[in-house]
Image (tube, rainbow, N blue to C red):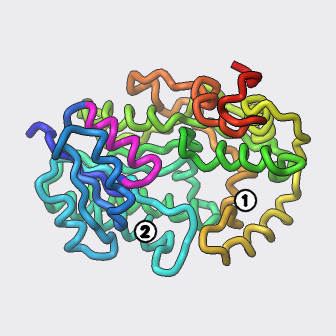
Amino acid sequence: MSIKQVTVFGGSGFVGRAIVRALAQEGYQVRVACRRIELAERIKTAGDVGQITVMRTNLRNAASVKAAIAGSQAVVNASGIPFQRGRQSYQTVHVEGSRAIAEAAKAAGVKRLIHMSGMGGDQRNSTNKYIRSKVDAEDAIVAGFTDATILRPSVVFGPEDAMFNRMAQIAAKAPFVPVVGDGSARVQPVYVGDIGSAVVAVLARPETAKTVFELGGPRVYTYREIAALVLREIDREKRIVGVPAGLMRLAGFFAEFLPVPPLTHDQVDLLITDNIARPGAPGLAALGIEPTAAEAILPTYLDRYRVGGRYNQHAPA
């Protein structure tokens, strides 16, 4: 059975949209399953008329998940939340949602299931609620669909990313750029377009079933180096100041009362923990993809944070 139609759960999100675009460019019919379809309408322009459709889907409703998968030969689970709010908890979305998708995909006779996890998805001893939910989600996927492929990206960058844009916003307004602790934790940023390419490559290679790929970019940075890179890109000179993790956790705790918290105490823990691929783990290279360097992409969207704005003729080329 050849794969013609793919259902992408969470296709309205930052990573999900890149996956949808990559699939559409390869000629797949794509069904975007998401809770808020108004956020997914714009992605339909990434394909021909009728090639990309949107379906309102609630992961808490088994019938809704089943309907989203019906007729598809492959499923991609890119659903996820950066923080918990009300019924949208890590347990509900990451774990129970993954279980519902895996079981529905198996029952529907789906040929391939790709699950978007994250580096750290193997840290079974982690006390971080976010990481624990990623571990449990992978277990739920494999329990329900043993042939699933799992992709674990590091921090993802691209025009609408959280990390680089947020740091640039801070650097443009604040008198200094804060990093958590001493900023020595390491990260391996991966380009969002490379993640889309990875999904396409996995679907084209049946031998990638039952495999975990750790997706990282071509270079490992410390968070202090990331801050310095951002300052260079936006042509600003600011001090990089380490802020004690305990103080940042406290700030994250109170920030969680905001409608959209800029930081949570769980995220602080992630910022003092290495987020890099394990030595020898298969990654983008194993899928025939050359990782894209952050330095090649950042100028295309961080330039708006430069002094004088995007069209400042004195900004660095």
Where is the N terminus found, in terms of image quarters? top left
Q: Which residue is mark 1?
A: 268
Q: Earlier in the sequence, mark 1 or mark 2?
A: 2
* Residue at the bottom extreme of this rendering: 86
Left or right, 181 with reference to 145: right
- Mark 2, residues whose alpha carbon is within 10 Å: few (<14), some, or many (≥20)? many
Residue 23 forms part of the magenta stretch: yes
User: From which residue to which does the magenta span run?
Assistant: 12-25
What residue sits 44% from the left and 64% below the top? Answer: 94
Residue 119 in view, yes or no: yes
Identity, as a three-letter code, of the amino acid under mark 2: Val
- Which residue sits at x=23%, y=71%? 64
Do the numbered discs 1 and 2 sit on residues whose CB atoms are within 8 Å? no
Mark 1 and mark 2: Cα distance apart in space: 21 Å
The relative height of residue 88 versus residue 159 in the rendered view (above or below) is: below
| Disc 1 residue crowd, few under 14, some 14–19, many 20+, Cα 10 Å | many
Q: Residue at x 39, y 53 (%)?
A: 78
**Left or right side of 248 for 188:** left
As for residue 277 lying within the magenta part, the answer is no
Question: What secondary structure is found at the residue carrying circle 2?
Answer: helix
**Rendered position, 222 above or below 10:** above
Q: Main secondary structure of the magenta part?
A: helix
In the rendering, which numbered label is found on residue 220?
none
The residue where tag 2 is placed is 93
